[in-house]
Amino acid sequence: MNTTSYKIPLWQVLACGAAIVTLSMGIRHGFGLWLQPITQAQGWTRESFSFAMAIQNLSWGVFGVFAGMVADRFGAFKVLLVGGVLYALGLAGMALSPTVWAFTLTTGILIGAAQAGTTYAIVYGVIGRNIAAERRSWAMGVAAAAGSFGQFLMVPVEGWLIASLGWQTALLALAAAALIILPLAVGLREPVATTGNAVTRDQTILQALTEAFRYRSFQLLMVGYFVCGFQVVFIGVHMPSYLKDQGLAPQVASTALALIGLFNVFGTYAAGALGQRLAKRHILAAIYLLRSIAIVTFLSVPISPMSVYVFAAVMGVLWLSTVPPTNAVVAQIFGLAHFSMLGGFVFFSHQIGSFMGVWLGGVLYDRTGSYDIVWYIAIALGVLAALVNLPVREQSIQRGDLRPAT
């Protein structure tokens, strides 16, 4: 690949990619606001809602692998089109599902598949193929920051829609909004000549997977991303209900989620920019350790709107800031030929963690009447993730060198 010439203009890649991630991630980040309205209206348990959200995260991870394979070979445009349509159908189904199983199918599987085709792995593949290597980490930080801005922008909007239109009509409005992804995808349509041939493919898919899964640093990145998924999805989905259980007004939760998105705009951009200068493994270890410290502090002080807002701001800086350095390391080690696919597998680990975080949150709450155990698990996992990222080896792999990282 000639990294000095851009197949799509830099501004176009960043503008369209950032807008798609903003919309897709912004809608997703507000799902916790629907937990109580849906369960109360339908007479379902929190575990039922949490299970659908857990399936959504797992579906996102499973379909993400295959979406990455298709995008690597044929480009992101078609994947984004299918993802946008599935997003609209899934949101409509979320509003109209009469049973828990229908809700799980639409909210879980359909929306999960849609997110696989409209978020980071797909957009980052376009960035990798069209932006020079020396600016790649920075560009990924911009796209991740856009997803955070989507949370800041969309969560209050979703709260307002629920209050103004009711939860069902609000979801149908979001379904219509998801279709905006389709025209935005046109801006990421790569020339046929650069699709599938933008990089030298000296490995088959099977060879690339074998190499990656035998490489210690890839394994460690997957462990860290599992923890990332566990923490952020548990907090994102269950914190609104946790705060209401503590006697705080619903507006506190909406404001907290918005603050997470606002401050993560700065956190993700900073992580991407710092990745050009500092060892990415050190950035990742610091993020995970600081998350655990933030949770311990939050649980230790008396709860109030102010303590919630401070916690949200701190967690916001750390929220998706793992995304740019993690993906940049994958590209740096293995190259771009199978980048979206390998990024999809790392993200699959993230989604297994997401499944466990959101599902255990519902299960343990229904069993114990408290989220305390899950908070403690999140703290311990953060320390683990900090430790396992330290030995990651960031240098480009030498083909045939499958020794563990040291």
Image: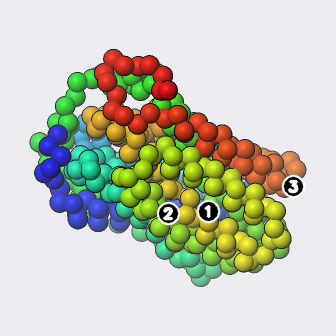
Between tags 1 and 3, which lies in front? Answer: 1
Mark 3 belongs to which amino acid? Gly
| Location of mark 1 (residue) | 315
Q: Would you say residue 264 is visible in this rendering?
A: yes
Image-based side of 128 in relation to 363, left or right: left
Sequence-first tag of 2 and 1 = 2
Q: Nearer the viewer, residue 232 or 405?
A: 405
| Location of mark 3 (residue) | 369
Q: In which quadrant of the rendered image does the N terminus lie? A: top left
Mark 1 belongs to which amino acid? Met
Q: Can you tell which quarter of the image residue 200 is in?
A: top left
Give the answer, above or below, for where 202 lies relative to 97.
above
Label 3 SS: loop
Q: Residue at x 61, y 69 (%)?
A: 313
Between tags 2 and 3, which lies in front? Answer: 2
Between marks 1 and 3, how big is the CA–CA gap? 25 Å
Q: Position of residue 5 (x, y in %)?
A: 13, 51
Q: Position of residue 300 (x, y in %)?
A: 82, 62
| Location of mark 2 (residue) | 267
Label 1 SS: helix
Q: Nearer the viewer, residue 313 or 244?
A: 313
Q: Position of residue 292 (x, y in %)?
A: 68, 52
